[in-house]
Each structure stands twice: as structure tokens, then as C-alpha cells.
Image: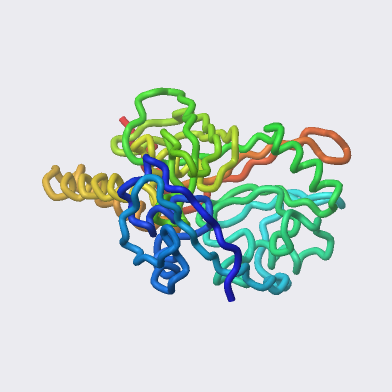
Amino acid sequence: MTGRTVSLKVEPFAAGQRVDTFLAGRDLGLSRSQAEGLAKSGQVLVDGRPVPPGRRLAAGERVEVTLPSAPAPETPPAPERLPLDILFEDDHLLVVNKPRGLACHPGAGRASGTLVNALLAHTTALAAGSAPFRPGLVHRLDRDTSGLLVVAKTDQAYDDLSRQVRRREVERRYLALVWGNIREDQLLIDIPIGRHLHDRKRMAAVVQPLPGRTVRSAQTHITVVSRFASMTLVEAKLVTGRTHQIRVHLAHQGHPVVGDRTYGLRRAQREKAGLEQKAALGAQASRLHQLKTLSLVRALQGQALHAYRLRFRHPVGGQELTFSAPAPPDMAQLMSYLAARKP
């Protein structure tokens, strides 16, 4: 079944692009492979004629694409008894320390085994939230990022906490271990973020947004906590809260988060190759140190990024609440080892 048809004019900056790349770069929710499939099935027209996905576009041409219909509503998430690390709970909200590997809510290809499923088994009182598949969630963390989240149990609490987030009154601080040596003690990364042009599951820092591409402002405060030989421990404080924001910003600066399997892979590979080379050529003590560091890096169960501090105002009582949670054991072990070896 087909859905709505969208008509787009090819601006001069897009001249020469493949039609599938052109469509993936528009705010249509299409990946390049999805656009390719639509073109192959005759759902993409250029000036009224079907074209193959590799057709190069000229300025002034008009591209029409028939988008697939929206999928049927998903089945509401079901309760599942999964372990929960709850730091605080009352009649209005709860604060949970989410482990790595646990997605916040069901999504494409994932109907169970999430934080929402665990919350539904823990309590029957959760706010409706912004969508049926994420009740109670005021904000979110990536699946492989650990740390603190506040969950609303009533609609009143949800509305107030969401308002605090929008007004930037909620303090969210993260610890991140990144590759390389960040020279500045403090910096503000102020670069918009948008969908990656060729992979809709990824985000990208967009220094110079082009017409037709949707981006959102994003600011992250970075403070260096400690510098090691090949890594830097930083505190990241969110000003905005975009998808993958800290990971994208740090990777764009040339300092991807250690253990991140999506962003900054080339830099990570170079850094690990450097450790391997030092292990092969160094003296005995240096060789053992490099091998131990590599072993601890490879033992990470996700990126070395942890939401360790959360501060907000209680939505009913009005009192300020502050919570903290230690880094997960594998990240803590790596940080502790590097600190002990620091000159």
C-alpha cells in the first residue's frame, strides 16, 4: 500500500547527486537503501518519469517520491520482570540507574527486554508519556550508555519534568573516557546535529547545514577531569539533549568515546594499533602496561559513557533532588588502572 507523495525541487547545491542520495538527505525518514528500493519499484519520478536510483540530478528538476504508508500501530509493551536499580521512588516519580545493553523502550525489531518493560512489571502507575511505547520516560539514554534517568509516574509529574528539560533546568552530567589528549581544560562544543546523509540510524555533526536538511542546535560543555597517555577522562554536561549528542560531538572533535562501535571508529582503530605497536616494541614494563590497557578496553561491554549525576526539582514538592551513580565495573576498572599508572 502506498502513502503520500512528496514533490521536491532540485536546488543548485544538490546538482550532480544521485537520486537515492538526494532523497536520503531530505527530512523524509528514508535511508539511502530505502530510497534505492523505492526508485527500483517505480515510486520515484524525475520530471514525471521513473528513474533508476543512480540517476544524477540537475538543478531545477523536480523529484516526486511516493512514500510507503505508516505502519500499523505497534502492540503496547508488556510487563517483564527484569532487574531494576532504583535509587529513589515516591508516588510521583522514580530515579533508575540504567545498565548498559538495556534499551530504554521498544522500537523497530525490538518488542521486549527494555527498561519500559521492566518498569511496567515494577509499577502499574506510569505517565502516558510522549508515545504509547515509552510511558513515563522523560528523557532517554542510548542502549549502550549507562546511568541515571528520571521516570514520571503521573501525567502531572511528566508535564512538569518535561518542562524542566525544555527550559534546561535539569542538570545531566556524564563521565566519558575518550581517545587522545584533549588540550583545552574546558570547551563548549556548539555544533548542530542532524541525521547522517547515508545511514538514518546514525547522527552527524553538521557544521554547514544545507537547504532542505533538518538539523537541531546542540551544545555540550566538556571539562577535562584527567589526562592519560592515550586517553582523556572528561565530564560532559548537556545543554541540549539530542540523539547521540555527546558521542557525535566528541567524535567530531577527534576524540571518540572509548568502546563506541558507531562513531569515530577510524580514530579508535589507530589508537588501538598504537597501543599494540608500543606493546610489541617497548620495554617489558611498557609492554605489559599496553597489553593490560588493551585488554581492559576490549572488555568494555559498551561505550565508556556514563550518566553519573542528575539534578532536578521535584514536580510536586518543589525541593531540589540530586542523585549520583558510580560508573559500571568495566569502565571503573579501566579508569582506575589508568589513574594508578599515571606519572
In percent of the image, x 49 and y 51: which residue is there? 8
Query: Which of the pair 24/257 is nearer the observer?
Result: 24
Give how far across and how far down residue 300 sits, in percent.
41, 55
Query: Which of the pair 37/108 is nearer the observer?
Result: 37
On screen, residue 71 above or below 219? below
The image quadrant where one finds the C terminus is: top left
Q: Residue furthest bottom?
A: 1
Q: Residue furthest left?
A: 281
Place residue 205 in its image quadrant: top left
Can residue 260 be seen at all in this image of the molecule?
no
In percent of the image, x 34 and y 52: which residue is there? 57
Give how far across and how far down residue 71 sits, in percent.
62, 71
Query: Which of the pair 69/223 is nearer the observer?
Result: 69
Asked if residue 145 lies left or right of residue 52, the reply is right
Give how far across and how far down residue 333 sits, in percent.
43, 49
In percent of the image, x 74 and y 59: which residue is there? 135
Query: Which of the pair 115/66 is nearer the observer?
Result: 66
Q: How is the image coloured?
A: rainbow
Give how far across and how far down residue 37 sits, in percent.
42, 70
